[in-house]
Amino acid sequence: PRKIIIDTDPGQDDAVAILLALASPEDLEVLGLTAVAGNVPLPLTQKNARIICELAGKTGIPVHAGCEAPMRRRLVTAEHVHGKTGLDGPQLADPVMPLQPQHAVDFIIETLRREPAHSVTLCPLGPLTNIATAFERAPDIVERVQQIVLMGGAYFEVGNITPAAEFNIYVDPEAAAIVFRSGVPIVVMPLDVTHKALTNRARVEAFRALGNESGRMVAEWTDFFERFDMQKYGSEGAPLHDPCVIAYLIRPELFAGRHINVEIETQSDLTLGMTVADWWGVTDRPANALFIGSVDAEGFYALLTERIARLP
Ligand code: BDR
Ligand code: CA
């Protein structure tokens, strides 16, 4: 199994991503979850990360709290999408498993120094603050990272928090710029692909019909999540953004994209956080990311359902 650290701001779709990873031990060894401020503030994201581990029956997974604000900006949150708790929808009890005392950034640095070089993949599902802070503080770890597979950005689908920017990149564009310039092999799951992985009635009911608690939670989270997207985009269902990252690690053949150059806008008020993706190769800037554009949505939901079925 491939060793991963999931950096996350749960978030209903983060929750489904984490469940998918925890349900897939033959493919993925989750070394830890690192929480970051994003969809909701850090006290909630770290608590939500622990709730999800407990739901999956994986209370031994270390959960670390990281940065509570972007590197150089005030935090922008997304309660309008995820609700006040970040995991609105079903009733959830407070977690019992402890938060690790170590800061997430230190955990990331220590883990990358301890594990063999090129054996740990980072999976950022929120703003890139923890990852970029670790890279700045410990430049020696950058070349030890195997790969970064992240959810963020958009090209044809442009923005969801501003007309030009996707939420995760917009919240901490300086951090995103550090990550995209790091030289680490990056795979990007932008809105262009996540908007092709929409829920629909049959897909949500398939989760509910699994009969386990995890399946019921996934159905209730997506029910909640859908309300926003259906109103906003008029789409049939909601995009399950973050699970695309984990699905890619398990079944890369479900996805297709292009190796291209991606730069992050950090200056302009109008297009702050835009992922300027050279999809058509009109510059000679070197490729720094595999930018995913399409997904086999049936295969993606089949994988999700099959794996969530294994959980309590
Ligand atoms: C991203 O922003 C968050 O709201 C979701 O969890 C996802 O990571 C989508 O733009
Ligand atoms: Ca997220």
Image (cartoon, rainbow, N blue to C red):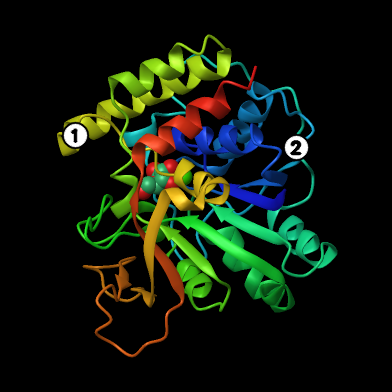
Query: For residue 292, what is the image quadrant?
Result: bottom left
Q: Secondary structure at mark 2?
A: loop
* Type of amino acid under label 2: Ile
Query: For residue 309, what is the image quadrant?
Result: top right
**Residue 278, position as x, y percentages in the image:** 29, 76
Quadrant in which the C terminus appears: top right
Q: Earlier in the sequence, mark 1 or mark 2?
A: 2
What is the residue that sits farthest to the left in this orientation? Answer: 234
Question: Which residue is nearer to you in this view: 71 or 150?
Answer: 150
Mark 1 = which residue?
235
**Residue 101, position as x, y percentages in the image:** 79, 44
Query: For residue 60, what is the image quadrant?
Result: top right
**Residue at x-position 28% and y-position 45%:** 195
Q: Nearer the viewer, mark 1 or mark 2?
A: 1
* Type of amino acid under label 1: Ser
Mark 2 = which residue?
61
- Picture disc at residue 120: none
285 left or right of 158 in image:
right
Ligand 1 within 8 Å of disc 1? The answer is no
**Local crowd at mark 2 within 10 Å, few (<14), some, or many (≥20)?**
some
Q: Is residue 30 above or below residue 189?
A: above
